[in-house]
Image (cartoon, rainbow, N blue to C red):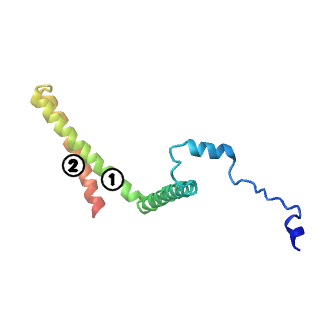
């Protein structure tokens, strides 16, 4: 009685979800024992996590950088401190050169006095800056 319904010309062919070439590549790969959709999902999660982490780190770095933007006073202070440290290193190098005999007594005295005068000037500016 319902035989016409079954033979109504409806095709039973359903197209495959993946092309045969992709299927052959999958079965010949070392990942063949894993579920292919799970592998794809894990790969997508790893990529999304990586991009999200990169964006998070960039934003965090930008936030820190915005917190530490130097004002003109901070730059001046850092400049004076570097001048002080460089002058102290130069005095030490000068003393070592004199101890090795590379400088005469008069050269050593002149350069030492010049560096000490400059160091005194820098320290005075630092003290004025801090008070």
- Please indicate, yes or no, whether residue 114 appears anywhere in the rendered image: no
Residue 86, given in percent of the width and then of the height, sits at 26, 43
Most extreme residue toward the front is 1
Residue under label 2, please give it.
120
Q: Nearer the viewer, residue 128 or 6?
A: 6
Which image quarter holds the N terminus?
bottom right
Q: Given contact means CB atoms under 8 Å apart, are the residues at marks 1 and 2 in contact?
A: no
Q: Would you name the residue on which mark 1 appears?
A: 78
Of mark 1 and mark 2, the one earlier in the sequence is 1
Location of residue 78 in the rendering, given as x and y in whole percent from the top left corner: 33, 53
Q: How many labels, in total?
A: 2
For the residues labelled 1 and 2, the Cα–Cα distance comes to: 17 Å
Image quarter of the C terminus: bottom left
The residue drawn where x is 69% and y is 47% is 19
Residue 25 lies, in percent from the top left, at 60, 42
The residue positioned 87% from the left and 64% from the top of the image is 7
Residue 46, compared with residue 8, is above or below; it is above
- Residue 117's label in the rendered image is none
- In the picture, measured across the screen, residue 114 lies left or right of residue 3, that is left
| Left/right of residue 27 with respect to residue 6 in the rendered view | left
> Which residue is depicted at the point 20% across and 44% down?
88
The one nearer the camera, 30 or 47, is 30
Crowd band around label 1 with a 10 angstrom C-alpha radius: few (<14), some (14–19), many (20+): some
Nearer to us in this view, 69 or 130: 69
Query: Which callout, 1 or 2, points to the residue nearer the camera?
Result: 1
Count residues near mark 2 (Cα–Cα under 10 Å), then give few for <14, some for 14-19, many for 20+: few
Q: Secondary structure at mark 1?
A: helix
x, y (%) of residue 93?
Answer: 18, 35
Question: Taking 43 as reference, is 99 above or below it?
Answer: above
User: Which residue is drawn at the image coordinates 34% and 50% (left, top)?
Assistant: 79
Q: Is residue 21 visible?
A: yes
């Amino acid at each position: 009685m319902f035989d016409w319904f079954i033979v109504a010309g409806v095709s039973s062919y359903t197209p495959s979800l993946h092309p045969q070439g992709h299927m052959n590549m999958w079965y010949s790969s070392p990942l063949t024992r894993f579920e292919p959709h799970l592998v794809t999902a894990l790969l997508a999660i790893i990529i999304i996590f990586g991009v999200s982490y990169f964006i998070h780190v960039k934003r965090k770095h930008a936030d820190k950088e915005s917190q530490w933007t130097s004002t003109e006073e901070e730059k001046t202070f850092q400049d004076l401190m570097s001048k002080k440290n460089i002058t102290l290193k130069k005095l030490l190098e000068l003393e070592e050169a004199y101890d090795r005999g590379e400088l005469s007594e008069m050269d050593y005295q002149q350069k030492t006095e010049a560096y000490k005068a400059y160091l005194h000037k820098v320290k005075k500016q630092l003290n004025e800056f801090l008070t």
